[in-house]
Image (cartoon, rainbow, N blue to C red):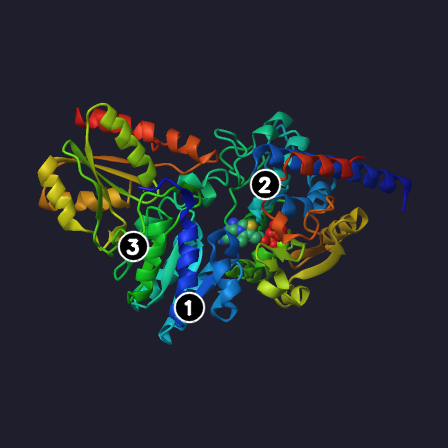
């Protein structure tokens, strides 16, 4: 396990550069945030295949729809809040309803966005995208995985949402690890409980698990990088094994990974889960680590909640 | 120019200098924030708050107050400096910009700050809210006016043009939009990212009265507001030509200073340039 701290956006930017070289159908689009989302790397190298629509997210999604009808593979990129929220109808009624090959990339997921505050922190994006028929939803945990996910999504036919984050976070996977859409990764095996997580909060989960180990508790940690299609088998397997599950995500309690897992379990194998997520409130300004702690998502708070749950 | 007017303009200039210093200090302290678009609109904001608008900072909910909607919400530091100077809250709050539990969030949150009418930050939405306020004033035969400050990049948003069409259609002559025409958005020159020109003609064709001014010349700004006050039958837009980062030499006309805080040395240089 490597410990370098890199923003996940970099993995996306790097993958786009790679795609620029190997797939001339790939078109990268942005809405006036190209430096922040890292699409500027692609823009510099492949200016003819980069489209900046200005600050016009709704237009961007449907221009992408048009491009996809001509067999292009557009990667629509901006902050998650602005694309999933503002352009929701375009994503629903044009992209998903017509099952178009448009990739939607929402950067700045979660409260770890920090000082920009609640208006810029996407905390409902996974829910909004997950409920749409035909949509694939991927939430990588670090820049290495974001790189692989981006390449995979370019091969997948149909609409997809890729969630990225702003803050540099610890790299918790390595280049050699396999990545398959829809198939969760077991990061570590332990016999005392199972923790499912999605996204960059994985770095905090791993820290929490180190703390738990010091208290003699060895968790299994499962990275649910694909929210849809959901890897139901692994959920049921570990539900049966432990009779209790923990879910951690940097998203509202409603609509995200926890909701998805709960709905599988209530039907197939009802057990208790501890869902560590953002309660029914908006994000706020503050330094990322301060916010994670205040919202119960720091390693320390995650550990405490897990201890209370399993003991 | 009359002596009284001269004096007034002198006063406004001094306030604007003070506000520019406040803006830079609070952003430097916070370590992040948006100086470029706060500084380009400082003179317009100063004229609005300290000459044109009627309000009572001791009674933020006063029904007859003029309404101000900062559609380009990232210019929050400017709005906060204006509100503090106007007495809505203590100037010491400015030091807490963007901090945890501060009322001064990265983008203005109306549930926290007295004087902020509605939360903004997602671009393109404020003008519609302003139109709703203006429409309500018409329905209720109230005399308050509504001002809304827009970024030029913000005009890329389709909703802005829906609001422009709506306001023209409804003859909202109590509505004054101000475009901070600094020619820059994040990805660069507005005309290269998504060309806006001919801009004034666009507003005119949507049935607005228009005026183009130098947004750093108080005489012209005040004259534009006079024109708005004589205006009838159509909404009114002031296209204010401005310089992004105005007042700080190394920030002026630089897209890179859209959303970046100055470090300590840079702050010192800036504050020197902004001495009275
Ligand atoms: C809907 C939406 N999309 C994107 C952004 C990110 N963003 C913040 S400021 C900005 C550029 C604004 O340019 P302009 O309106 O010209 O502002 P100014 O130059 O006055 O600072 C962008 C793209 C946003 N806040 N809202
Ligand atoms: Mg601008």
Discs 1 and 3 lie in a common subunit: yes
Chain letter for the residue marked with disc 2 in the picture = B
| Foreground label between 1 and 2 | 1
Query: Camera-side residue: B132 or A286?
Result: A286
| Residue denoted by label 2 | B76
At 52% from the left edge and 45% from the top edge, which residue is drawn?
Answer: B120
Q: Is residue A303 left or right of residue A231?
A: right
The mark found on residue A137 in the picture is: 3
Query: Camera-side residue: B206 or B85?
Result: B85
| Residue denoted by label 1 | A21
Q: Is residue A52 visible?
A: no
Question: What is the x, y in percent for residue B113?
Answer: 54, 33
For disc 3, does the CB lie below 8 Å from ligand 1? no
Q: Is residue A103 above or below residue B174?
A: below
Q: Dividing the picture into quarters, in which one does residue A253 lie?
A: top left
Tell me the element at label 1: helix
What's the CA distance linking mark 3 and mark 2?
Answer: 34 Å
Q: Is residue A297 left or right of residue B248?
A: left
The mark found on residue B69 in the picture is: none
Chain letter for the residue marked with disc 1 in the picture = A
At 21% from the left edge and 49% from the top edge, which residue is drawn?
Answer: A184
Tell me the element at label 3: strand
Whether label 3 touches label 2, CB < 8 Å: no
Q: Is residue A191 above or below residue B177?
A: above
What's the CA distance linking mark 1 and mark 2?
Answer: 41 Å
């Amino acid at each position: 396990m490597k410990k370098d701290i890199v923003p996940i956006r970099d993995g996306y930017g790097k993958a786009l550069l790679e795609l620029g070289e190997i797939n001339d159908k790939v078109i990268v689009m942005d809405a006036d945030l190209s430096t922040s989302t890292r699409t500027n790397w692609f823009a510099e190298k492949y200016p003819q295949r980069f489209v900046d629509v200005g600050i016009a997210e709704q237009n961007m999604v449907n221009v992408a729809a048009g491009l996809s009808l001509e067999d292009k593979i557009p990667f629509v990129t901006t902050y998650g809040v602005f694309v999933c929220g503002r352009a929701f109808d375009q994503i629903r009624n044009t992209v998903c309803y017509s099952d178009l090959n448009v990739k939607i990339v929402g950067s700045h997921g979660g409260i770890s966005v920090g000082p920009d505050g609640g208006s810029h922190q996407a905390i409902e994006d996974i829910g909004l995208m997950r409920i749409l028929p035909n949509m694939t939803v991927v939430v990588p945990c670090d820049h290495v995985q974001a790189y692989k996910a981006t390449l995979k999504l370019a091969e997948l036919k149909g609409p997809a949402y890729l969630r990225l984050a702003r803050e540099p976070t610890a790299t918790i996977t390595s280049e050699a690890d396999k990545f398959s859409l829809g198939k969760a990764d077991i990061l570590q095996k332990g016999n005392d409980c199972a923790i499912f997580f999605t996204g960059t909060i994985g770095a905090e989960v791993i820290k929490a698990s180190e703390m738990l180990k010091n208290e003699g508790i060895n968790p299994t940690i499962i990275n649910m990088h694909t929210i849809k299609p959901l890897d139901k088998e692994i959920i049921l397997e570990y539900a049966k094994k432990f009779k209790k599950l923990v879910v951690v995500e940097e998203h509202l309690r409603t609509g995200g990974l926890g909701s998805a897992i709960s709905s599988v379990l209530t039907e197939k194998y009802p057990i208790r889960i501890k869902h560590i997520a953002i309660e029914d409130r908006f994000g706020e300004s503050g330094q990322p680590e301060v916010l994670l702690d205040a919202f119960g998502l720091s390693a320390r708070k995650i550990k405490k909640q897990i201890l209370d749950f399993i003991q | 120019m009359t002596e009284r007017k001269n004096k007034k303009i002198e006063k406004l200039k001094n306030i604007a200098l003070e506000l520019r210093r406040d803006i830079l200090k609070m952003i430097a302290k916070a370590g992040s924030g948006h100086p470029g678009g706060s500084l380009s609109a400082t003179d317009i904001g100063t004229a609005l708050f300290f000459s044109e608008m009627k309000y009572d900072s001791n009674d933020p909910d006063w029904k007859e107050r003029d309404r101000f909607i900062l559609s380009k919400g990232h210019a929050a530091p400017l709005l906060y400096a204006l509100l503090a100077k106007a007495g809505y809250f203590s100037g010491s709050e400015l030091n807490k910009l963007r901090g945890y539990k501060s009322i001064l969030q990265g983008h203005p949150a109306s549930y926290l700050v007295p004087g902020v009418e509605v939360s903004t930050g997602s671009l393109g939405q404020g003008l519609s809210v302003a139109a709703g306020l203006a429409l309500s004033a018409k329905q209720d035969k109230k005399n308050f006016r509504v001002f809304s400050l827009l970024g030029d990049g913000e005009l890329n948003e389709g909703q802005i043009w829906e609001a422009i069409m709506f306001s023209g259609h409804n003859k909202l002559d109590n509505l004054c939009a101000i475009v901070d025409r600094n020619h820059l958005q994040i990805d660069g020159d507005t005309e290269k990212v998504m060309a806006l020109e001919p801009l004034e003609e666009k507003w005119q064709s949507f049935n607005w009265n228009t005026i183009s001014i130098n947004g750093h010349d108080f005489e012209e700004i005040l004259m534009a507001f006079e024109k708005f006050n004589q205006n009838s039958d159509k909404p009114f837009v002031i296209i204010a030509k401005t310089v992004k980062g105005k007042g700080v030499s190394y920030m002026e006309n630089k897209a890179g200073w859209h959303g970046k805080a100055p470090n300590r040395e840079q702050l010192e240089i800036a504050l020197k340039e902004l001495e009275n």
